[in-house]
Amino acid sequence: MRSFVTFGVVALCTIVSALPSEVPGYNLSSFVLPTQTGNLTLSPPGSNVELLFLALGRGTQNYSCNSTMSKPVSKGALAILYDLGPLLEYSPPDLLHTLPSYVLDMASPLVPLSAAGSHFFDSTGVPNFDLLSHGLSLKGITAETIPTTTPPASLGLPRSPTNPVNWLHLTATDCGIGSEVLTDVYRVEVAGGSSPATCTNVTAMTFQVQYAAIYAFYGPKR
Ligand SMILES: *[C@@H]1O[C@H](CO)[C@@H](O)[C@H](O)[C@H]1NC(C)=O
Ligand SMILES: *[C@@H]1O[C@H](CO)[C@@H](O)[C@H](O)[C@H]1NC(C)=O
Ligand SMILES: *[C@@H]1O[C@H](CO)[C@@H](O)[C@H](O)[C@H]1NC(C)=O
Ligand SMILES: *[C@@H]1O[C@H](CO)[C@@H](O)[C@H](O)[C@H]1NC(C)=O
Ligand SMILES: *[C@@H]1O[C@H](CO)[C@@H](O)[C@H](O)[C@H]1NC(C)=O
């Protein structure tokens, strides 16, 4: 119900966000957002927004199981957002796109990446992205979601299949109220995070599944 109402508001309102007083430091213009996985694509960012922050998210997707007869229910997520800006300047684009698959087994910190913020779900179940150290934040609602296709073995990634959660596009809720500057975030190149299909083998009421993904944050063009 809540998400339905919010969708309507987003469609009707013009998001007016203050422009960042201080622009995040790295030149991100070489990054091309991947929008296609398998034969499905997310709608690309609008022409009125630009990439303001690029992050590697590394954390857990949370689930709950009431009984061994039920199916796991998603209970939000918690992830650290690492600044990919420095890496983008000095590495081939391919590295970024395969990074989530490589870091899934690694514990933080991911040297030389620095933690810039976090992704969490607030008490009302709304996904939040806190990059306030860079003057950016987003309270989001899912605008689009597509299932991740397991990458072909030919890519030689360390884990295949990765059992990934979906690729997503989230937009700011409530015309940007509660968000700073950001209007959109894309979650792409996902590794891990999905629950088992059933609770049959799950012994705890709540459990976490490790995941990693690229998060691309957009705000109004300057
Ligand atoms: C950012 O990098 C692109 C090449 O990737 C370059 O064309 C552009 O001039 C750079 N912008 C700034 C502000 O340095
Ligand atoms: C898209 O891919 C899925 C899974 O690989 C397949 O089942 C489906 O038929 C494909 N659809 C089209 C239109 O090619
Ligand atoms: C699990 O139980 C809680 C409270 O008892 C309930 O709110 C929730 O909907 C249940 N979930 C499932 C998947 O049955
Ligand atoms: C998700 O699990 C983490 C532990 O990995 C926990 O700290 C966090 O509060 C949980 N978030 C939600 C929304 O349940
Ligand atoms: C549960 O565990 C058994 C034994 O490891 C395995 O064969 C089965 O596929 C698992 N079921 C699920 C739903 O994960």
Image (tube, rainbow, N blue to C red):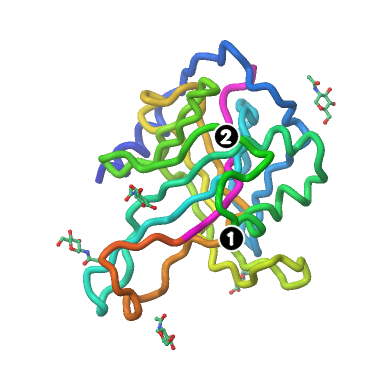
Question: At x 54% / y 39%, what residue is drawn?
Answer: 81
Q: Relative to 75, say whether 149 is above or below.
A: below
Dot 2: within a 10 Å radius of its alpha carbon, few (fewer than 14), some, or many (20 or more) residues?
many
Can you tell me whether the CB of the residue at mark 2 lies under 8 Å from the nearest atom of ligand 1? Answer: no
Tell me where residue 202 sits by quadrant. Answer: bottom left
Residue shown at 52%/34% (left/top)? 184
- Residue 217 forms part of the magenta stretch: yes
Q: Quadrant of ligand 5?
A: bottom left
In which quadrant of the rendered view does residue 219 lie? Answer: top right
- Estimate the spatial distance between the alpha carbons at disc 1 and disc 2, rounded to whole Å: 25 Å
Q: Is residue 33 magenta?
A: no
Nearer the observer, 52 or 2: 52
Residue 145: give x, y in percent of width and height. Answer: 50, 53
On the picture, is 187 further left or further right than 9?
Answer: right
Q: Nearer the viewer, residue 218 or 102?
A: 102
- Dot 1 or dot 2: first in sequence order is 1
Residue that mark 2 sits on: 217
Tell me the kind of residue under disc 1. Answer: Asp
Q: Residue at x 68, y 22 (%)?
A: 25
Identity, as a three-letter code, of the amino acid under mark 2: Phe
Q: Is residue 33 above or below residue 199?
A: above
Pinpoint residue 165: horizontal percent, then vertical percent. 50, 60
Per the image, label 1 sits on a secondary structure element best described as loop
User: Percent from the top left, x then y, of residue 100?
Assistant: 63, 54
Magenta span: 210-222
Q: Which residue is under mark 1?
A: 105
Residue at x 26% of width, y 66% of height: 205
In front: label 1 or label 2: 1
